[in-house]
Amino acid sequence: MKTKFISYIFSASCLLSGLATATEQAPRPNILLVLTDDQGYADVGFSQYASKDIKTPNLDALAQGGITFDSAYVAHPFCGPSRAALMTGRYPHKIGSQFNLPVNGSAAGIDTNEEFISKTLQKAGYFTGAIGKWHLGEQAQYHPNARGFDEFYGFLGGGHKFFPAQYYKQYEHVKKQGVKFFNDYITPLQHNGVEVRETEYMTDALSREAIKFINKAADDTSQPFFLYLAYNAPHVPLEAKEEDLALFKHIKDEKRRTYAAMVYAVDRGINNIVESLKASGQYDNTLIVFLSDNGGKVQYGGVNKPLKEGKGSAREGGHRVPMMMHWPSKIGAAKRYPHPVSALDLYPTFLSLAGAEAPAKKELDGKDIWAHLSDGTSAREGESLYVMRHRKAAHDVSVRRDQWKAVRTKNTGKWQLYNIEKDISETNDLSKTHPVILQDLVNDVAHWSWSNVQPLWFHQHWEGDQWRKDDMPKFGETFTLK
């Protein structure tokens, strides 16, 4: 397919900041988006707060030749809604996807009127693939192949067991009993809608399929590729290979030990994938983006320190995630980017780099950040990022603008204010010192909430019952300062 071109013209300062200047037209990049599941902020070696017991040498090597983000956020602090935001470029509250999809299969899925980044890139001439966890809809109209992915290998639900010998046995047992709706964690994997008999440990299988896709893409290098590689590690169930566990036998806590081994398996796969890119001649022009879908789950081995709390929280530990970018032909020496960025920014940034246009009337809640990465400036000075997680009869809400963060959780029942640049752990509440700033931030997120829509589904029936019983969303109470 004929390749379109886009020019990249950066200021002279980008040479100093580590991004190479390109004054001539360059081919559109391949894009490899790697998403892990419930990986903690401190659980990569390239983090400035890296846990000492985690080993990610291959991710670290990429980060050492790329950009590390100190203040990267996702649009929601857990699973499905975070992924919906990544694919649509919209806050999940704007499209009714604030909750995980109904458990164990349903007819629900992300609104097909919201074009995924995969479909936009596919229409622009990209060869597209999705590998791993989907969690965005299981019916035909919501299937990855219907949402812009030429290739799909993985599972449609929100999680999965890792060892085929175990989950196939359970699946066959239940199937013989005539069950129609299966637990997501034991269903067979599929390739483009057809069930396959997987034999490898899940993480290794997904890395293997990524390499297959990359090698297939190499058959026509005039057509760039977009690969969305969504590992389900280190999400529960905590299951790791014996040889990986042996590397972490010094970790006494069993959950942490298994978690570390699962992260290491991802990193091992990254090494194999990078080698395949090099062997196929695609390495130099491939933009690799790595991040987690939300904060680590501290009850199951994740570490987000020094951030407060973890997965599911409006505190930093729930939605501030490890993230890095690597692109040999455009990014040179290692660079840290301290300013806030959002997973919502990836959709418009990818479009810009690909020379693609957003669909007509398509709303995007993020922004193209590439030029700001080149000169080291904030992409959203004076602009806000929001997080809202619905609780029983209440909400956990936060808004960050520049150095300020206002947050309200059900546990505290009141609004608090932090200078998040100086107080990353949210320990020094400044709400009494700067009441005007706090009120302005609360007004800001209240205004944002006006265009939020009612959830189109709930993960469990009782959640919907409780929502209606409590007459939610009760935003009036949420955005009132006490």
Image (tube, rainbow, N blue to C red):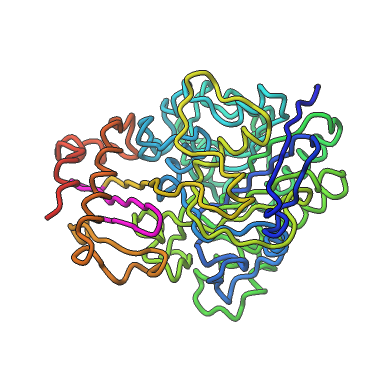
Q: Is residue 213 magenta?
A: no
- Above-or-below relation of 204 to 307: above
- What residue sits 40% from the left and 67% below the top? 424
Q: Is residue 400 magenta?
A: yes
Magenta-tinted stretch: 391-408
Left or right: 55 in relation to 364 = right
Main SS category, magenta section: strand
Q: Give x and y (percent) for residue 441.
A: 27, 50
- Count of all numbered marks drawn on residues in the image: 0
Q: Nearer the viewer, residue 177 or 164?
A: 164
- The quarter of the rendered structure image containing the N terminus is top right
- The quarter of the rendered structure image containing the C terminus is bottom left
Q: Quadrant of residue 223?
A: top right
Q: Residue furthest front?
A: 12
Left or right: 294 in relation to 133 = left
Q: Nearer the viewer, residue 363 or 77?
A: 363
* Residue 462, visible in the rendered structure: no
